[in-house]
């Protein structure tokens, strides 16, 4: 049976590429179709560099051709990415990079209580285990928890002389450099500051610190979408953001707002992906069973809906909570389900960071006009 190019194009007209709005033939994504006996070659041009979009598009093409044209055809899909140039926003200015720090990743959540700080701590130690130089800035001014999770709650940063200037030396444990407002307050002391005072304190932690050479700095943001977030993004060259959520509807609604904040035109920080925490519960006595206490794959579906990568899921395991309370992040344990989960997630974060740096220009900071701004990135 001969395969006609017209039949193939008609089949491809039933596929819409995520983000394009029209079918791939009408949108011009299909550049060429070539047939050789039982082999079909489809050349495609996409405007998004996201790996999960490319994989999904390729799978859709193969499936559709097999269903509508020839079930036995050998299908080869060649995808070329040509991201459209973004118009220059007059509110964007170059941000202030920190010498020696290669990538700054904001770890955010729209809602409190979803395990954002726990995820940030375990991402940090997993990156370190992979050989990266890592620092973590606890930017949750009103509820700092990173010092407890790293068993350094009673430590105080020392002063060091760098180039004739006095700088704070981050506290270090498990190979991670750490700074937090929690180092400068008493355990029972509430931080009652207005936005400008909190922003000033954060700027000191960022720019008056001797961070040294880092491959990754993780910023543990407060929950929500408020003044602290905008101050951080105005001050720092954010490479990208990771949003943490649990699967239930209430958390997902706030996670959606978190993604929307980073995507606003005058913020424009790339969202590297969404992580689902407390995805399911597996009791020790029934290791093959999974109980979806808070709902099933809610964050995964949200990622697909928002067209951002799904970075992975973390199960609801008692040892994660116990490890955080004891000051030793669970990912430090070897040969465990938790270590495997965080290794998979961390690999995805690294891959998305590399892809973002290869395919997108540096993020820029916004001038403060009617709202607080955000900042620029350096690869």
Image (tube, rainbow, N blue to C red):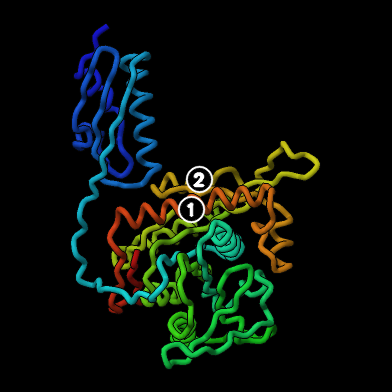
Q: Which mark is residue 101?
A: none
Mark 1, secondary structure of its residue:
strand
From the top left corner, tell me how far across and down residue 346 is, in percent.
Answer: 52, 54
Residue 198 showing in the rendered view: no
Query: For the residues marked 1 and 2, what is the alpha-carbon distance in whole angstroms?
Result: 8 Å
From the top left corner, tell me how far across and down residue 132 is, in percent.
Answer: 51, 62
Quadrant of the frame with the C terminus:
bottom left
Q: Are marks 1 and 2 in contact (CB under 8 Å)?
A: yes
Quadrant of the frame with the N terminus:
top left
Residue appearing at x 53%, y 58% in the figure:
244
Residue appearing at x 35%, y 55% in the figure:
356
The vertical placement of 36 against 192, above or below, is above
Residue at image mark 1: 274
Q: Badge 2: few (under 14), some or many (20 or more) residues near its Cα, within 10 Å?
A: many
Give the image quarter of residue 321.
Answer: bottom right
Mark 2, secondary structure of its residue:
helix
In this rendering, position of residue 142 left or right of residue 260: right
Q: Badge 1: few (under 14), some or many (20 or more) residues near its Cα, within 10 Å?
A: many
Residue appearing at x 54%, y 83% in the figure:
169
């Amino acid at each position: 049976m001969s395969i006609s190019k017209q039949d193939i194009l008609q089949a491809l007209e039933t596929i819409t590429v995520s983000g394009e709005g029209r079918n791939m033939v009408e949108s011009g994504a299909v550049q060429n179709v070539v047939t050789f006996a039982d082999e079909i070659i489809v050349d495609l041009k996409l405007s998004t560099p996201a790996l999960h979009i490319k994989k999904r598009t390729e799978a859709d093409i193969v499936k559709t051709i097999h269903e509508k044209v020839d079930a036995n055809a050998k299908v080869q899909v060649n995808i070329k990415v040509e991201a459209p140039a973004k118009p220059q926003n007059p509110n964007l200015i170059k941000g202030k990079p920190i010498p020696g720090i290669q990538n700054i990743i904001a770890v955010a959540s729209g809602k409190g209580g979803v395990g954002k700080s726990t995820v940030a701590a375990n991402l940090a130690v997993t990156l370190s285990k992979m050989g990266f130089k890592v620092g973590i800035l606890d930017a949750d001014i009103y509820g700092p928890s990173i010092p407890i999770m790293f068993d350094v709650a009673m430590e105080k940063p020392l002063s060091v002389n760098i180039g004739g200037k006095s700088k704070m030396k981050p506290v270090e444990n498990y190979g991670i450099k750490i700074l937090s407002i929690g180092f400068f307050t008493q355990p029972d002391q509430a931080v009652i500051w207005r936005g400008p005072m909190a922003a000033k304190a954060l700027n000191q932690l960022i720019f008056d610190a001797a961070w040294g050479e880092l491959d990754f700095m993780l910023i543990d943001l407060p929950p929500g979408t408020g003044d602290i977030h905008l101050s951080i993004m105005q001050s720092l060259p954010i490479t990208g953001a990771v949003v943490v959520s649990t699967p239930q509807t209430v958390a997902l609604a706030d996670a959606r707002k978190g993604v929307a904040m980073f995507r606003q035109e005058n913020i424009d920080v790339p969202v590297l992906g969404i992580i689902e925490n407390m995805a399911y519960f597996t009791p020790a006595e029934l290791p093959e069973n999974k109980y979806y206490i808070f709902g099933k794959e809610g964050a995964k579906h949200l990622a697909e809906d928002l067209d951002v990568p799904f970075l992975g899921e973390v199960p609801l395991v008692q040892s994660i909570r116990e490890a955080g309370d004891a000051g030793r992040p669970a990912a430090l344990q070897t040969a465990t389900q938790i270590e495997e989960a965080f290794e998979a997630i961390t690999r995805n974060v690294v891959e998305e960071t590399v892809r973002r740096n290869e395919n997108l220009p540096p993020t820029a900071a916004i001038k403060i006009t009617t709202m607080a701004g955000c900042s620029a990135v350096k690869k």
